[in-house]
Image (cartoon, rainbow, N blue to C red):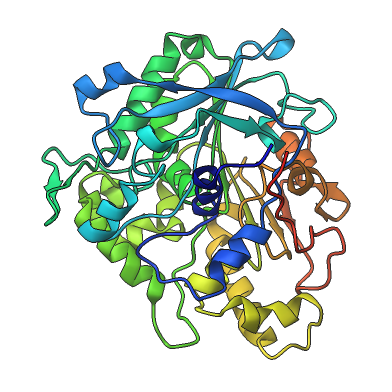
Amino acid sequence: MLIRFPALLSLLLQFGFSFGLTPFPDAAFTKAINYTQEKAGDAVGITLLQDARQSGAVCLDGSAPAYHLRPGFGSGAKNWHIRLEGGGWCESSSACATRAKTSHGSSKLMSNQILFNGILSNKYSANPDFYNWNHVYVRYCDGGSFSADVAVPVRHWSGQALYFRGLRIFRAVVKHLQTKGLSTAKQALLSGCSAGGLGVVHRCNEFKYLLPNANVKCLSDAGYFVNGQSIRGNFAMYNYYKGVVNLQKLQNTLARACTSAKDPVQCFFPQQAQGYIRQPTFFVNAAYDNWQLENVKEISWRQYSPCMKSSFCFHAKTLQAFRQNLLNGLFYAQSRAGWGTFIDSCFSHCQLEVDIKWTRPRIHGKSLAKAVGDWYFGRSQSTHYIDCGFPTCNPTCVKYPLMSTST
């Protein structure tokens, strides 16, 4: 079965394409070959929360928020995994008006079904620790990492009304799921990919507040975005996030202890925001995150791809510096009891939703799936896994190309 073009576009958005950042000519190709649409996933139908519109919990275009739920079973029936979809941000009214005409801005354009793989899989062989949990995939349609709550819609010059209500969407979905059994959860995990992974950083405390009786932990997948200087001398990510924060008024919803003492834009970055998370948190990131290499370091795929074959490539030092900057930022997480990290030396962005990325890459002999399970259930004293330091050093990394358009 061929994937329809809207679904393919959604996949590209999930892995970091944003309408505000200007991708290099080969950037979309990089995202495409970084994704494997696997045959073994089970299709899960969409649920639209039409009643949530009464509380103002709506997508950019005013449509209802949405999620996909596969109920748990057996010993996992009381355990819940909530995953926040990723897909970039929008930093201007024009970018958001464009986004509102996609599945990342309107539930009217979302696929009716999506495949559950990786940490969402119901196969014991691929997902032994979480296969029988209740799995929820929350669709991302606000462009602000589930963090904005702007009462009055912004009117674009075209006449399009834009609603920045990601925080309301998160609350509405969680409260709705509480009526379906989430309120009695014993174990709960909040995870997310990319912009959804950043959303986890900002929503983790509230998730615990809404589930006071559950064992709550949080998992950010490719959500640790680095505030670094590009090879052009720009601070591209800071400038971009500045537009997102100002447009969506995130200074009103980010951790007050942070924004009262620091620049709100800095507080949107996980390096600052992690200091205000109260729940045990696990960060999964590729040391050579291809989306960040292209949009933070502003290195095109053609420029850094030789480093996939040789550590003596032209940009080797630049990549090493990026990795070190990431590790320096994660020092705080590595010093917290009960927290965890898995930083492999792969070229990848989002690793938990694809079986092969969830189970194959290993650090010191331990797979990502095993590392996350051991951390969540407290089976190992060691919860921090840092890979070898060169792009070609780990033979278990999933190689390019990976894109398949059939199931």
- Is residue 263 something one can see in this rendering? no
Please tell me in which quadrant of the rendered image residue 337 appears: top right
The residue at the point 73 percent across, 34 percent down is 373
Q: How many marks?
A: 0
Is residue 404 something that shows in the picture? Answer: yes
Q: Position of residue 159 (x, y in %)?
A: 12, 49
| Residue under the image location 25 percent in, 40 percent down | 61
Residue 218 % position (x, y): 54, 37
Image quadrant assignment for residue 76:
top right
In which quadrant is the N terminus drawn?
top right
Between residue 324 and residue 354, name the one nearer to us: 354
Name the foreground residue: 272 vs 136.
Answer: 136
Q: Toward the viewer: 69 or 238?
A: 69
Q: Position of residue 323 (x, y in %)?
A: 63, 72
The relative height of residue 200 versus residue 64 in the rendered view (above or below) is below
The quarter of the image holding the C terminus is top right
- Please provide percent x and percent y for residue 41: 72, 31
Going by the image, does 206 lie left or right of 159? right
Residue lying furthest bottom in this view? 314
**Is 188 above or below relative to 92?**
above
3, 347: nearer the viewer: 3
Which residue is pictured at 39% across the width and 77% down the height? 235
